[in-house]
Structures are given as C-alpha cells and as structure tokens.
Amino acid sequence: MNNQKKAYIFALCAVLLWSTVAVSFKIALQYVDFMQLLLFASFTALVIYAVIALINGTFLQLFKINKKDILSSAVIGFLNPFLYYVVLFKAYSLLPAQIAQPLNYLWPAILVLLSAPLLGEKLKLISVISLFIGFLGVYIISTQGNLFGFKIETPLGVALASGSSVIWALSWIYNQKDKRSEQKKLFWNFLFGFMYILIAVLIFSKIQLPETKGIFAVIYVGFFEMGITFFFWLKALQLTERNDNISNLIFLSPFLALIFIHLILKEEIYYTTYIGLFLIVAGIFIQRIRE
C-alpha cells in the first residue's frame, strides 16, 4: 500500500470518529455536567498523549522545554482545551446536537476574519462573501425549523456554540505561531487545560465519578474527540502527497454526524439544519476556491 492510500485511510478514520462525537457529548451530558465532562475527558486525552509518546520513544523529549514554551502552553491551554470545551459542552447541554454541531463548524470562516487583524492578512471581497454566507447559515440553523418566524430559539445556546468557533480559531492562530512539535504542544496544552478545569470543578462543581455508562461516554470523548483522532489526522497529513487531497475530506464530517444524531439520539433533523449546514460548508468552499 502506497503512502497516499495510507493517508486516505488515516484521514477517513479521523473523519468517521469525529462524526460520532456530537452523539457522545449528548450521551455523556446525561450523566455528568459540562465541567465534569471536560475534567474526565481531558484527563483521558492527557493519558493518551503520554502513552503515545512512550510508544514512540519520545516521552522524555516532552519535558525538554523552556519558560517561553511553558508560557505559550499556559495561554493556548486556557483557550483550548479549557475555555473552548467549557463553552462548547455548555452549548451542547442547552441545544439539540443537530444545532450545536454545525454551529461549531463555523470556525474556518471565523479564522479568515481573525487572520486579518492578528496575522496581517488582507480581507478580500470573496472572503467577506463567504463569511456572509456562513453567518446566514448560522441564522437559519438557529431558527430550529421555524425559518420564517424570524426568531432565534435558545439564543444563549446559539451564542455559545457559535462563540466556540471564535475560541477555536484564536487558539489555532496562536498555535500556528508556536514552532514546537505537534505532539509536544498537544501534551502541554492539555496538561495546562486539565489543571484549569480541575480548579474550575473544585470551585463551581464537584469531582464525582459517574455511573458505568457515563464513564464509558466521557472516556470515549477524551479518547476520540480530544485524543487519538488528532494523531490519525496528523499522520494523514504527513503521508499525503497534497494536503488538499486530505483536508477536503473533513467536509464529510458534519453530514455524517447528522446521520449518527438521527439514528442514535433519535433527533428529527430540521430542514433548516440541512439548509444552514449546506450554506456554512458552501461559504468555506468559496474561501478554499479563492486560496
């Protein structure tokens, strides 16, 4: 098997696993609150990163860092995983999965908008058009099947789900400026993120192990949303001949997720969810065409 075929296998595995996490969020939130979910899931992810480093023989290299690296991870770890997942999990606790999942998918459009002031990139007309199309999709999704009622259902949940895209885009920009290996960044960012959420849980919630089904759900979130799937995706990007061969596969994820949401959570998918998600993805595609 050549490297390109291996790249597709790793990428499709990552896309398939990421397509299931919206379901796992909702199941886990039946047994724990959103802070406890992040606490257990981020700890699981941290253990996975350590185990992968041990298997690769790079564990000791994780600790070859300087003060600048520690400060960088302290900042990025606060944004993601801590703040990003606190906001996202709270949104999922308020919204149906079919609404929260596509709204969170707005981050590529937000990334373009934030790149102008933070990276000095010029915001072109086609980018503005793609942003408008994406935000139109957000509005349509947020009507939850009542398109012509001109009313946003559950505005706090919509604001949180959309806001999580802003946090993700910010963390991505700052992460790109950090030239350490992805493995080292993930480990230290999650280490700081875990410490932040541990403090938050001790102040605002409590540490309490969920029942057996809940334990499996939070471990699933940590293992597949935050953990091993990132390495599948990074491996695919390392093996592929062209990044766009792989990166375009990610557009399958939100549509596959709707299938899982309908089949497992039994949510009746609103027609506005299909329309809005199509517009969000179309906006991202327009931006990709420009690039």
Image (cartoon, rainbow, N blue to C red):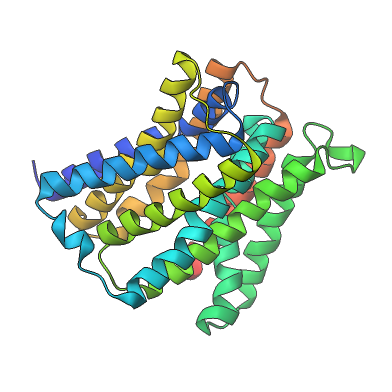
Relative to 184, residue 263 above or below: above
Foreground residue among 164 and 202: 202
Q: Nearer the viewer, residue 149 or 207?
A: 207
Quadrant of the frame with the N terminus: top left
Residue 232 at x, y = what percent? 27, 44
Name which residue lies at 64% across and 46% down.
Answer: 103
**Could you tell me if residue 283 is visible in this image?**
no
Q: Position of residue 146 (x, y in %)?
A: 84, 33
**What residue appears at the point 57 percent right and 41 percent down from the top-left corner?**
201
Return the residue nearer the eye: 90 or 271.
Answer: 90
The C terminus - image quarter: bottom left
Residue 26 appears in view = yes
Q: Image quadrant of residue 261?
A: top right
Q: Nearer the viewer, residue 118 or 251?
A: 118
Above or below 288: residue 27:
above
* Point 40% across, 36% down: residue: 222
